[in-house]
Image (cartoon, rainbow, N blue to C red):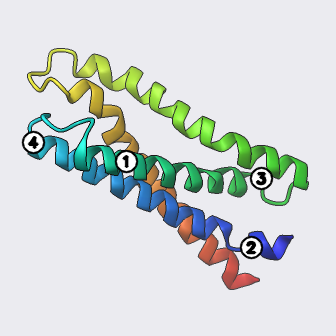
Amino acid sequence: MKLIFSRWAQVAGLFLIGGTLAWAIKLAVIVATNGRIITSGAAAFFMATGIVLLLIGSTGIGYYLSRNRRMLVRAIAIILSPALVFGSFILIGMVTNPLLQNSSIWYAQQEAPIGVGVIVYMLVGYFLFRSGRRDSNYA
């Protein structure tokens, strides 16, 4: 079983990076259309793609944090990590929404948590990718 998961941190990191790139493109579409395309077309496609990739990639966080633990603990961490990642967007929104309350860009409050999440989880994905590479060099 350890062999199957030996590179999961690295793979999951790539999924996180891919998900954040999809959401960055979604934000670019929204900005380029001045908010006219948010729930349809390219924005909807990249939002859905990003959700799937982030869902898969977020399991790498649980995997990484539960290294050297029993298989049951590792399984629980992997299963719960997507909920924690997507729950973090609520916390990010609690910080960004008051900052953008009087913004002249009508969609800024709605999209700000995603913008901050893109930056945060891009870095987390990169960290997971690098940690997986580092662990595999010593295996």
Q: CA distance from mark 3 to mark 2?
A: 13 Å
Which one is earlier in the sequence, the residue at label 1 or at label 4?
A: 4
In contact (CB < 8 Å): disc 1 and disc 3: no
The mark total stands at: 4
- The residue labelled by disc 3 is 66
Which one is earlier in the sequence, the residue at label 3 or at label 2?
A: 2
Which one is earlier in the sequence, the residue at label 1 or at label 3?
A: 3
Q: Which residue lies at the image location 55% right of the left edge and 70% below the top edge?
A: 130
Percent of width and height locating residue 65: 71, 52
Q: CA distance from mark 1 to mark 4?
A: 20 Å
Q: Is residue 83 above or below residue 131?
A: above
- Discs 3/2, front: 2
Which one is earlier in the sequence, the residue at label 4 or at label 3?
A: 4
- Discs 2/4, front: 4
Q: Which residue lies at the image location 23% right of the left edge and 46% below the top edge?
A: 41
Q: Tell me the crowding category of disc 2: few under 14, some 14 to 19, or many 20 or more residues within 10 angstroms, Cα based.
A: some
Percent of width and height locating residue 91: 47, 26
Badge 2 amino acid: Ser
In contact (CB < 8 Å): disc 1 and disc 4: no
Q: Which residue lies at the image location 23% right of the left edge and 36% below the top edge?
A: 38
Q: Tell me the crowding category of disc 4: few under 14, some 14 to 19, or many 20 or more residues within 10 angstroms, Cα based.
A: few
Q: Which mark is residue 33?
A: 4
Percent of width and height locating residue 112: 29, 33
Q: CA distance from mark 2 to mark 1?
A: 26 Å
Q: Is residue 96 above or below residue 128?
A: above
Q: Which mark is residue 6?
A: 2
Badge 1 amino acid: Val
The answer to which image quadrant residue 87 occupies is top right
Q: Which mark is residue 118?
A: 1
- Discs 1/3, front: 1
Badge 3 amino acid: Ser
